[in-house]
Image (spheres, grey):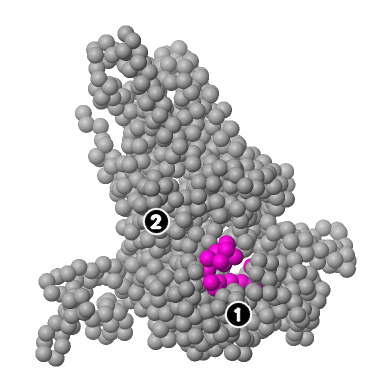
Amino acid sequence: MALTTRRSRLSTALRYALLVAVALVFVFPIVFMVMSSLKPDLQLLRDTTSFNAFLPVGDISLDNYFAAFRRAPVALFVFNSILVTSITVAVSLFLCSMAAFSFVFLNWKGRDVVLAAVIATLIVPFETIAIPLLLVVNNLPWIGPNGLTTGWLNTYHVQIVPWIADALTIFLFVQYFKDLPKDLVEAARIDGATWFQVYARVIVPISGPVIATAAILKFLAMYNQYLWPLMVTQSEAFRPVMVGLQYFFQLNVAWGEVMAYLSLITLPVLVFYLALQRAFIASIASTGIKG
Amino acid sequence: MSAKSTSKLQKHTLAGWLMATPAVGLITLFLVVPFLLAFVLSFTNQRLVSPNPTQFVGLSNFEQLLGVGTLMLEPERDDAGAIVRDARGEPEYPRVRDYTRNNPDYLQLSGMRELAAMSWGENRLVFLARDVVFIKAVLNTLAFVAVVAPVQAGLALLLALLINQKLRGINVFRTIYFMPVVVSIVVVSLLWRFIYAGQSGLLNTLLGFLTLGNFQPVDWLGNPATALWSILAMSVWQGVGFHMVIWLSGLQTIPESLYEAADIEGATGWQKFRYVTWPGLRNTAVLILIVITMQAFSLFSQIDVMTKGGPVDSTQSIVFQAVQRGYVQQDIASGSAISVLLFLIVLTISLLQRWLTRERN
Amino acid sequence: MKLAFFGTLGLTTALSTGVMAQTELSMWYHGAGNPAEREVLVGIIDDFNASQSDWVVRLQEFPQAAYNDSVTAAALAGNLPDILDVDGPNMPNWAWSGYMQPLQLSEDAIANFLPGAIGRWQGELYSIGLWDAAVAIFARRSVLEENGIRVPTLDEPWTGDEFNAALDTLKATGDFDYPLDLGMADQSEWYPYAFSPFLQSFGGDLIDRETYTSADGVLNGDAALEFGDWWQGLFQNDLAPGTSQDMAARETGFLDGRYALQWNGNWTALPAIEKYGDDMLFLPAPDFGNGPKIGAASWQFGVSANSDHPDGATAFIEFAIQDKYLAAFSNATGLIPATSTAAALTENYKPGGQLEVFYELSAQQGELRPVTPGYIVMSPLFRKALADIANGADPADALDAATDAIDADIARNNNYGF
């Protein structure tokens, strides 16, 4: 008995040792980023040649953060990014999961062909169609406070609408739905539920894990947008965080401020992930379903 | 992708279309239409903005990108007919550029450059390409994908298994492992330039410390032999948490009762993985393999921030070249032709993947 | 401007002029994130807006690294402002593509300007700069004297042989990581700006400036091959750090004494003076046979082709090129004021000022990068060729590749109107 306890303690210790070792690999560049944000430029650069890079040593202060706020409207950029990102994520989860529901649970003409075509669009990297897309949105109409207008440049919606639907999100939902028990759907249909009701009341409530996964992935993709907002927003009022990063790359790069800015803009994403993770684990604990 | 459980007799075409149309319509308008536009452009000589008229040029953009040829070089001989050798005793050959530049006898090779060469008896067989940079970009991208897909998927699964344990504080590790994903790839590339720096970068410092100073500093990004693999290692580091999360969501749909049953049967850890875990991850595995492959083919930001395709084309990638030509050099026709070729390459590979991972009944 | 394929896009954003007496002029500038420049520019705009009652200039700033891409996208979408600024060598492309219209300034207004600050294309003035920049060899008098190396002057620069010998001497001391720092990690416009003058001093060039229709025999001719071999030697013989130089080293290496010489711009001169004081020297480029040369032309102002109010835009630019504003910009940024009369008003460029030497460098050695719309294609190709040669590629092959690509581009664009 005593032997097994000792052995299991030893194995627990080994497990933690492994977890910590792996954690160090993942965290060291981020520690470098945060520590560097506290140092003056020259010291920061000199420290990169030694372990001081990871330590809060030398002339430590929050000066870089204050300087970053003076150099660029950081709060505006973060606000823009969070606004654009959260609207996109919310609408995207709804439309993409509904489409995936249709692809998996409904039987309709042309379904398999359309799904194959949607998944094929995963192949097209955005960079390769950026310019044609610019030409498309520049000729689209929009109805807003100013009535009917043509051309979407310099708006929030030009940063949102083209990104709502994407094949990856649909694909994530499709693969998850395929593992769900089909009898749940059929039982609800026999009870007289409409397809939308089945989707909203039966399937969505047991899709916590995939919703959380899709949400965080979409959030990251949107929050880190660079080329597209650069092309479609000429006005500072609409600029997001990654375009804002360029404010810090002057002829003499202010590395300390860069690191401070990077630390700042990474924070909202981390908060979002932590919040989701909690919801994500709760949803698994509560359903415990599997077909 | 067919869901076989819904009755074959019942069709729900209206409801099906209604629920799928919003997302599918948006994808069509913002992805399919621009791609078709790019497809049309690839057969023209269109510039980004130019006062010259646009003309259809047929396949010439593709011919320019894909043109290849070979050249057999005989060693130089002196007046007596003996082979001229250099200081190391290697035979000397005439220069390739004497054949490919202003040589009326070899017009079909005009404008080509050396891609690779090999010995062919005492001769030298030279492979030529009209667009060496693009061909290298294709080869590099294929190598990148071939290594990244299995390595990253495998590591991600190991990590997912590691953090799927019931241990106190596991959420902390789950968060830490995911952190690189949270940081944008552009930011990560900037940080890793400090890590990979040649003379006294953080990685060289660390390796020197671990080997008690016996490690010779490596110029990770400056050496054609290591640059692509350094970028690859960083890409895996950044992206593996992403796929770990997808594996994890697959793992967590496997019911606990199956593991309990396996425990009662006295299954070993490996047996549990082989017969319970892995079959439960089938759909996840397909998803991950496809997603990693697609992402790897999109290799761009790391190259743009860290090496710009160098040193000596060792890190050129297809998308980097598409952007370089379409945007930087404002040759949208050629950039679009690269996009079309990329689409065809990836389509072929994913059809192959699907065939290989098809469900065998 | 005729956009054959995109011609239907039209001008979707014609400014709506309200009932206000003053007409709004939009202006784009590349200086976002640079508070010093912003302050001066906003000051000029405020002065201009207050000085008359016809026009109001509204500023929109962009970060420099994103500026050209933003302008290209905006031009594609027909969405350009009235006034924009343009990096000198890009101007011919923007003029040819129809982003810009000629600037209606009198010749008298720009008579006293440094050649590098004047942007002409096809005989017409399109842009005018408030400043120029210059590069020099940063060096310390004490280091040169200790090693018996002659201190070169503007009238008598180092010859190529002298320069090479100096590098070997400095390397042999063993006191330095490298005798020379070129800034090879900065893979941007720095390459053609800083390094193509070396090629020109050897007798080569990016393109045949007689015809502007081919680079063959110029970028890959005998002189260029000689340059290529010299260039490769710098890196093969460990005389200069290569493309993977640490970012930290570029910024601190010379100041920490790890590099003996540094090829750098006047915008980094002040920290060097602060560090080395009177010991600090800014030396002219070496003469490799065809005269000592450095790059010229920096950011300049012009009027966009879309502008409905070129008279207002021109009025602003004419207002902005007064000596007092040139001096204010120079004091804020360390750049070279575009006129000698403005230089006299500045802290650093007045007679006896710490950076006075740069004004003469710019005036005497400044050489424009090729004045052609095709320059935007040459620039990345030249950069790639130089990076490849530094990394061991065969110089002749690398220069051939760049030559072929440049010639193909020119042919595909109907010779860019030449």
Determine whether B152 is above or below C70 in the image: above
Give the residue drawn at x 35%, y 15%. A6
For this orientation, the residue located farthest to the top is: A1
Residue in the foreground of this view, choosing between C329 and C145: C145
The image position of residue B231, as x and y in percent, is 40, 52
Magenta residues (range) = C250-268
Give the residue number, with chain letter if any, for mark 2: B217
Instruction: Give the residue number, with chain letter if any, for mark 1.
Output: C283
C264 falls in the magenta region:
yes
Position of B127 with respect to C136 (left or right) is left
Q: Are marks 2 and 1 in contact (CB under 8 Å)?
A: no
Picture residue at 62% right of the left edge, 51% below the top: A256
Foreground residue among C389 and C221: C389
Up/down of A290 relative to C156, above or below: above
State whether residue B168 appears in this view. yes
- The chain carrying label 2 is B
Q: Residues within 10 Å of mark 2 (few under 14, many from 20)?
A: some
Query: C36 and B51: which one is in front?
Result: C36
Above or below, C126 relative to B336? below
Q: Marks 2 and 1, how far apart in space? A: 34 Å
Q: Secondary structure at mark 1?
A: strand
Q: Can residue A238 be seen at all in this image of the molecule?
A: no
On residue C274, which mark appears?
A: none
The lab-note entry on whether marks 2 and 1 share a chain reads no
Q: Amino acid at mark 1?
A: Leu
Determine the residue positioned at 43% across, 81% down: C227
